[in-house]
Image: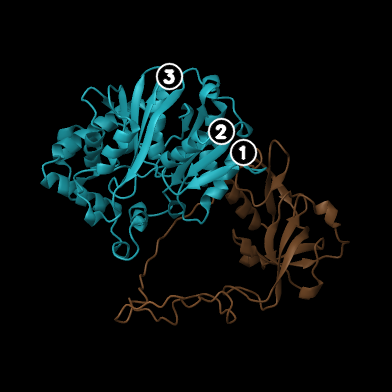
Chain colours: A brown, B cyan
Amino acid sequence: MTVDPSEDRSVSVLPDDLWTQPTPSVPVDLGDEPVRRQVVPGSMRYDYTPGLASSRFLRGLAEKRILGERCPETGEVYVPPRGVSPVSGLPTTEQVEVGPSATITAFCVVHIGFGVNAPPTPFVSALFLPDGAAVSLYGTMGEIPYDEVRIGMRVEPVWVDDDQLTESMENIRYWRPIDEPDVPAEQLKGHM
Amino acid sequence: MRDVAIVSVAQSQHRRAAAELNEVEMIQPVIRAALDQVGATISDIDFTCSGSSDYLAGQAFSFVMTLDAVGAWPPIVESHVEMDGAWALYEAWLKIQTGAADTAFVYSYSKASPGDLPRVMSRMLDPYYAGPLWPDSVAYAGLQARAMLDAGVTTEQRMAEVAHRNREAARNNPNAQVVGSASVEDLLAAPMFSDPLRVHDCPPISDGGVAVVLAAGDRARDWAERPAWIRGIDHRIDSHQVGARDLTTAPSVAIAAQRAGVDGAFDVAEVHAPFTHQEQLVLDGLGLGDDVVVNPSGGALAANPMMAAGLIRLGEVATRIMDGSVGRGVAHATAGQLLQQNLVCVLEGGD
């Protein structure tokens, strides 16, 4: 298998001097030209199964519904659900539809995009607390200048076209503001 | 040394693929059962330690998700080993010895079914010389079996007898995956799988897990009528480079056994020997007499959830001590390639 050294890394281009490898402070004299690189192709395939709770969540997404699950002890609703309450350790079996409206609990203005699907920079990634949920979902903001995003802002998901819906988080293209008053930060305590 | 005992053991019903469940859904009932058996909640536990592997799960930091089943929020004192749970138990035992904890909860598990286990296992090899060649774990075990057969240390007949005895014993194990065996004669008539190994020489691929509660002194006596006291525990490791080892012996078993105080009479031994030829190496290293009952559970040949099959051996001995059916036993766990790393634990009833 031949590998083009200029093509075999998918790491984003970073500015100079940011996270670059420092030169060794101790010179290494190995006499001959050192072996600097060993290319070892390899892959492992996993047929991953999401489990009962995540399957329910993913099927809900295919219907543009955000389904959390309730802790039988505390009543908190977790989304995406993984099947067990992290507080009580008990199975979550009651499904609860949350959102779609949500509140921003934290955000970051991204100037260096990672990955092939990153929006044009600068963009805003944020944590969105769906109404009725105890925890937030990750996503990106759209339809608003990056410097107008704020904690407490009310938002809604923008879904892909109906014929594009699958059992995937990518069903939510991004989130956008809705015309509702901000939620005061003190009301978001415990969810940030 | 503080007196520390296993006071509760629970395990899953092991099977080839728990396909409908994610890892936390698979292990949650096991975790709950181990705590419920002693009437404990996580707030009664001073230290929690788990064993699992991201390579098996196919996910980064997979153990963090299974912590949900412990009830790890608000935060608890917690640790993890990328090893069989027997080593998680060792860490918990040490923690109790330091006095930093009186009680501990230990669990381990794996879902090997999403991946190609024999290939995944090759990722334990060094990444420069052996790893790039992707030798699968069954072929690797075949090297050891061949060396042992050639040296006259074992025979195909004896290997088949080990398979037969373990899987017949598994008839009494409700958690076993492979139960019952054809006759030794029929086993030997089967074709080679990875010569000199036949299918019966290999462990099953299993999804499953195990959970154990440890407690010191009076706390152990409160929680269990007959605590299974840990009278000795030690682990040793041989070279990571398989070519540097004599594969017909397992010196680290013998040293760990000596350090753990394996001498005198034992009622039962549970040894972690995934391939049939390996059982003899472990028994030779332990130096047990012929009167010891070996692997009444069926051992790893009956169910072999990676990262759990070693801790299950300790659990199987402890369970028999706690139910009064045996007085003293030895348990062995292995990790790495071809019995590279070995842990030995002596467990005993009484006060």
Question: Do marks 2 and 3 both belong to one polypeptide chain?
Answer: yes
Any part of residue B73 in sight: yes
Hey, which quadrant is residue B235 in on the image?
A: top left
- Residue A49, percent from left and from top: 50, 52
Q: Residue at x 65, y 44 (%)?
A: B75
Crowding near pointer 1: few (<14 within 10 Å), some, many (20+)?
A: many
Q: Tell me which chain the residue with mark 2 is part of.
A: B
Q: Tell me which chain the residue with mark 3 is part of.
A: B
Relative to B103, is A93 on the left or the right? right
- Camera-side mark, 3 or 1: 3
Mark 2 — residue? Answer: B32
Front residue (pair B157, A157): B157
Instruction: Name the residue type under label 3.
Output: Asp
Q: Secondary structure at mark 2?
A: helix
Compared to residue A87, the image places residue A29 above or below, namely below
- Residue B348, percent from left and from top: 39, 23
Compared to residue B23, the image places residue B241 above or below, namely below
The numbered disc on residue B323 is 3
Front residue (pair A141, B210): B210
Q: Earlier in the sequence, mark 2 or mark 3?
A: 2
Q: Are marks 2 and 1 in contact (CB under 8 Å)?
A: yes
Q: Secondary structure at mark 3?
A: loop
Relative to A24, is B102 on the left or the right? right
Spot the residue most to the right.
A181
Hey, which quadrant is residue A171 in on the image?
A: bottom right
Compared to residue A179, the image places residue A57 above or below, namely above
Measured Cα–Cα span from mark 3 to mark 1:
28 Å
The numbered disc on residue A89 is 1
- Residue B80, percent from left and from top: 50, 46
